[in-house]
Amino acid sequence: MSDPVARRFRFVVFDWDGTLADSTTLIADAIQAACRDIGEPVPDRTTAHYVIGLGLADMLDHIAPGLAPARQRELTDRYRHHFLRGDAAVPLFAGVPGMLDELDAAGCLLGVATGKSRVGLNRAFAQQGIGHRFVATRCADEGFPKPHPDMLLHLMERVGADARETLMIGDTTHDVELARNAGVAAVAVSYGAHPSAGLARLDPLALVDSVAELRLWLRANT
């Protein structure tokens, strides 16, 4: 990991699944169940966790490449069926609301860059009641998905923040690569979809193991 830098971040952008919301098990289960439903090879947990954070089309294309369009639609429908069965019960990680309160009180602008669809993110905001905390959000179906820099470039333009004052926080290598491609610093969290070893290889500004540790880091850097 890089040495700490002598700057403070004004615009903090979070991934959603696996970073703010404890949804990685549900997503991986839904991927495996959808493949099983249509008779495709069922990916192991490592593979199912790897694709979390990509847009849905990219995620399922990676899991089951080369499917005919009708089979792709069938796989997508079965994934959505299994995911939506458990979506309403997905909690935020403990400590997330307080962390967002602190950042808001400190005057930070908050954003979300997610592989979810706009419909999915709006549903999550309604369920959790924290959508008002975020001044700008970008979803995978609104432009290029991760790790293309489009999400962060759009968000920075939207709020008038430059790359040096922007921070991306996520639980996958896709998030860290998104930040790198946009010229933005990243903090990786190891409690989500991707293991810490893979995250560390991308040299994020920091790698933290819990929301409590992330909260302490943010207190010192925002």
Image (tube, helix red, strand yellow):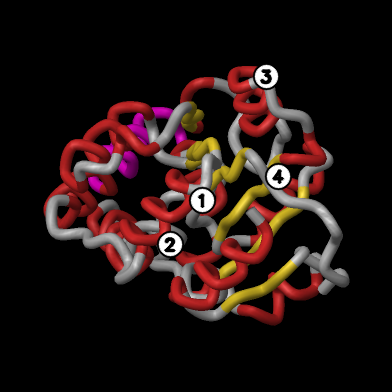
- Upstream in sequence: badge 3 or badge 4: 3
The residue indicated by pointer 3 is 157
User: Which residue range is magenta in the image?
Assistant: 68-78
Q: What element carries label 1?
A: loop
The residue indicated by pointer 2 is 18
CA gap between label 2 and label 3 equals 26 Å
The residue indicated by pointer 1 is 53
CA gap between label 1 and label 2 equals 9 Å
Q: Quadrant of residue 2?
A: bottom right
Front tag of 4 and 1 = 4
Q: Residue 178 carries which label?
A: 4
CA gap between label 3 and label 4 equals 16 Å
Q: What element carries label 2?
A: loop
Q: How crowded is mark 3: few (under 14 residues within 10 Å), some or many (20 or more)?
A: few
- Upstream in sequence: badge 3 or badge 1: 1
Q: Which amino acid does label 2 sit on?
A: Gly
Q: How far across and down, in percent of the image, does residue 178 sit?
A: 70, 44
Name the residue: 34% across, 68% down: 95
Front tag of 3 and 1 = 3
